Image (cartoon, grey):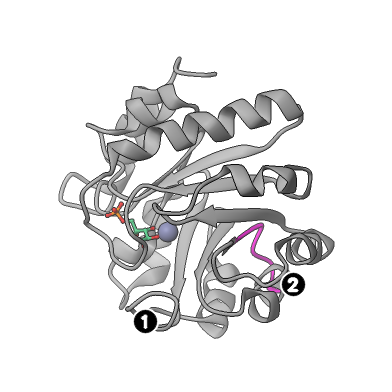
Amino acid sequence: MQISPSILAADFANLESELDAISTADWAHVDVMDNHFVPNLTLGLPVVESLLAVSPVPIDCHLMIEDPDRWAPPYAEAGAKSVTFHVEAAADPRTLAREIRAQGARASMALKPATPWEPYEELLPELDMVLVMTVEPGFGGQTFMADMMPKVAAVRESVRRHGGEVWIQVDGGVSASTIEQCADAGADVFVAGSAVFNAEGAANNIEQLRRLVTGHGH
Ligand code: DX5
Ligand code: ZN
């Protein structure tokens, strides 16, 4: 059970101290948006390189970009330990996952809410993680889509049948009130932006989220 706070909800003028504030997390989730795959623009490789130089935890890069076949491997090469591309944007997800692994990162594939899992099940041997989006990608602070839980369960069932260590990540609207149903459905990596970076304090929020899913193992 791992917690990956999304720095999309952090103070972008103070990213180094915001990373320090989540040093008890398992990962730092970095949302790269290109204003084409999603209607929002965040940051790119130069900023990720700077974050990699100072982050106390490994970086989990979520690429919401067009043409990940071309643009994703450099994030792995730069040192991101997990690189997630969207299958809707990838021309050749199998080759892309192999390239990400060849650069030394965990290869992860994301599914938007309207994208089914079953057509991609055969890619499982190429993957270290599947990200089931629980909001429409593009913005933080949106309402959790509980109707994605059957998809999480379907991925978990495929992983069980296939064997091996493939993590299942959920991202979007994950909070103290929604994280347990994600764990019960089979998720084991939890991204949370607004539920971590708020007035309660990041460390407290991480601890609370972790406590809620402890014992919910599959
Ligand atoms: C949305 C991003 C998320 C976002 C989650 O497209 O992929 O990582 O930061 O934010 P919350 O947890 O606030 O829904
Ligand atoms: Zn994300």
Image coords of residue 186 (percent x, y): 50, 27
Image coords of residue 120 (percent x, y): 65, 49
Relative vertical location of residue 83 with respect to residue 131 in this rendering, above or below: below
Residue ID for mark 1: 41
Residue ID for mark 2: 77
Q: Element at badge 2?
A: helix
Q: Is residue 79 magenta?
A: yes
At a point 55% along the width and 44% down the height, the residue shown is 117
Q: Give the range drawn in magenta.
A: 77-84
Disc nearer the start of the sequence (2/1): 1
Name the residue type under label 1.
Answer: Leu
Query: Quick one: which residue is furthest to the left in this view?
Result: 199
| Nearer-the-camera pick, 83 or 212 | 83
On the picture, is 56 further left or further right than 72?
left
| Nearer-the-camera pick, 95 or 207 | 95
Q: Examine the image and state in which quarter residue 90 appears.
A: bottom right
